[in-house]
Image (cartoon, rainbow, N blue to C red):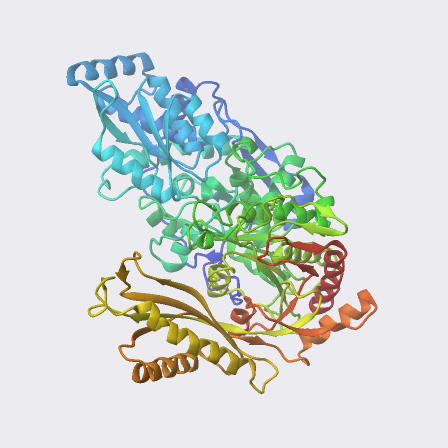
Amino acid sequence: MAAERKTHASPNEQPDSSRWYLNRSVGTSSIGPHLDVSVIRKFHRHHLPKYSPTRLVRLPQSISHELGLGQIFAKEESLRAGLPSFKILGASWAIFKLLVLRFNLDTSDPSIPLDAIRACIRNEETQTGSRLQLVTATDGNHGRAVAVMARLVRVRAIIFVPKRVGEGAVKMIRDEGAEVILVDGDYDRALYEACKRSSEGSTLPDGSRTTSILVQDSYVEGDAASPIPGWIVDGYSTIFSEVDEQLDSNALDMVVVPAGVGSLAHAAVQHYRHPRSSNPAIFLVEPTSAPCINSSLHAGRLTSVLTKGTIMEGLNCGTPSTLSFPDLKAFVDASVVVDDSATLKAMGMLKDVGIDSGPCGAATLAGLYAVLGPSVAEVVRNNRKDELGLDAQSVVVLVSTEGRNTWEHRQNVTRDTSPLAISDPVKLAQALVRISSPNPDLSMGSEKSEGENAIASYVRDWLLHHGFEVHWLERTKGRPSVVGVAPGSHPSFVETEPRPKSILLTGHLDTVSLASYNQSEDPLSGAIKDGKLYGRGTYDMKAGMAAFLAAAYNASLESHRGDIIVACVADEEYSSLGTREILEAGWRADGAIVPEPTDQQLALSHRGFVWVEVVIHGVAAHGSRPDLGVDAIAKAGYFLVEIDKYAQRLSQGPRKQKGSVHASLVKGGEEPSSYPATCHITLERRTIEGETIESVQSEIEMILSGLSTTVPGFQYTLKMGMSRPPFSISSDHPLVQTAEDAYRQVLNQDPVRGELLAWTDCALLHEAGVPALLFGPKGFGAHGADEWAEVQSIMDLTDVLTKLVQEWCK
């Protein structure tokens, strides 16, 4: 028997407190009237097809020993009443209760025949002329469970599903006879649409009206009086009642439950927070991409979060259940968030012992390892076990809520080769080039781009399969960035000398237009000819990205004290949404490498830029009336001549690094027979260190104001547009020195230092306090009609980066 749980504060608050929550004052009183689970179980036995208690599987002693526990069991819900999830337990009971009460049947009899309920439904429809339908929102399993019950009682089901849910899950719902409506957005948006449909009703193609009832496991605005969420929670109690019987004489010390909106966790609280219970600790697990319960527990109030992509689709919820959260806040002992890579590993461990768990189910084992696993510092493990009342004799049950077949991998990252072969940087570069990723903000005319979604999904899956922690960031819809982490072996909160250093390897997923590529060639071929890898984005910068991904993986296989972080970001070709989002989310490192195309030089600087919008004003008039019109385009010519002189002055400046200016866009006039009222000119001013948007504005303003005094009728409007700062790093910075040493050791030659003319995200990293260095492959054709990178250079770059990372993070 485990020791009594403590409720005092832990003496060691750790930096991962936002991922880990411990309730300092767990309620000890009873939650309320004890639920009579026997009635619910009788209903499940009588009405659910193929019902039988699911397995309680004891995990190998090696796992229990590694976590410092006595026995660990998994309650396997991979096949519950013919469905791959526990969800049918709650949906079936709630729909049964709803219909029994609606038709004034005997609520104390859980064995009422479904035929009797069907007859009542037909009678009501005949009398009212309105057809009953059930409506819900789902990430997969709940919707399928509602569809099954709707089919059994012979009513329509309308299921709202986020588009991100896989086609296989959608097909399974449709196969149950339900109508599926795909929704742009996340689960919360799908729930909003389901609520709207249920409140408004609808008219069927045959002209008949419908009466819609929302079957959801959480309250929604304006529906707090609905008993349905509570009935769904009650239905889940069958799981814990079965666990009690299956454990027999083994007292339970902790139950680990996936959180979602909190309904299953609420069922655990209802079941175990009674005097007759052994009062085990209740521990919840969520994905890092959707920590709504964890965030709410930390805040002490119900909190919504912005969700992101995760393989734990059933837990990808942004708002906790308003019904469940008060009891979770009072009675849950702890919660933790886990990333997809940890869950993927846990799926493999469970499969090895014969449990075919999906990611939501395996999250419970991942959560247990996150707080008690060998990678956690011993002092932290001991404190947590003490707080939870656990020891080497403790009995723990993990609720594995779904089967593996509910998870669809978005891409087969191995493609035509093996997982090990895809770690080859050249093959990886080919795979990246073959995924179209033009920046949609640069798309012109009929060309349409879906942006970075496809390539971000590929990179995410590649990182997962190579053992990285993975984080998906998508503040701007459709513009995702991916961060992968190979954590260092040294805990960041333990001070030692020398302090371990982390490194960030980062590059952009987007490319410029495919339309500008050589029309006689396939821009996505990834073909290799004469030692060159061809395709749009090869040189800028998918070859560099493949090199740093492979290098990060290679370096992660060796011992490293510091964290190895990779970031594959959106939108560098336009406004750097991805890098700005990652920095604003708090990602930092002691040094960064950006493998933009530098022709294998170590580039220590690049210029910044300012975009300037100038409008030259004229007066519109008929082309035959020069006495009335002022030609804005002709007046703009004076300005363009001055810009040419300005550009010459900049090119002749005394400094080695020089600024530049050019007119990028000129637009004016409406038709040949009219004097143009305006001429719009866009300038790009490339800046060097010491130049700012203010100094550029002053220089342009001086030119314009001078023309307004010397050219009759010259009028203008000046507007400063987007700007990005220049970047530089000192040649004696330790990052540069480490890179040069790695270069010499790997390639047996001295590196060449240089400057990159184009702007890169290095400037944003530098502004955020992250020292950065540019080092990329040899090649040609960035933004050009033909683009390629040297195959040998990709391999050389990978080897140098591997050595650099190993030395920096050792």
Q: Quadrant of residue 500?
A: bottom right
Q: Is residue 681 left or right of residue 18?
A: left
Say which quarter of the image contains residue 800: bottom right
Residue 168, relative to residue 64: is it above or below?
above
Q: Is residue 273 above or below residue 619?
A: above
Q: Residue furthest bottom?
A: 654
Q: Quadrant of residue 657?
A: bottom right
| Position of residue 673 measured from the top left corner of the image (x, y, whole percent) | 27, 58
The furthest residue to the right = 748
Residue 655: x, y in percent? Answer: 59, 85
Expressed as whole percent of the image width and height from the top left, the position of residue 330 reads 37, 52
Q: Is residue 376 above or below residue 139?
A: below
Name the image quarter holding the C terminus: bottom right
Task: Name the residue at 71% across, 39% down.
Answer: 417
493 sits left or right of 223 in the view: right
The picture places residue 617, in percent across and down from the top left corner, at 28, 70
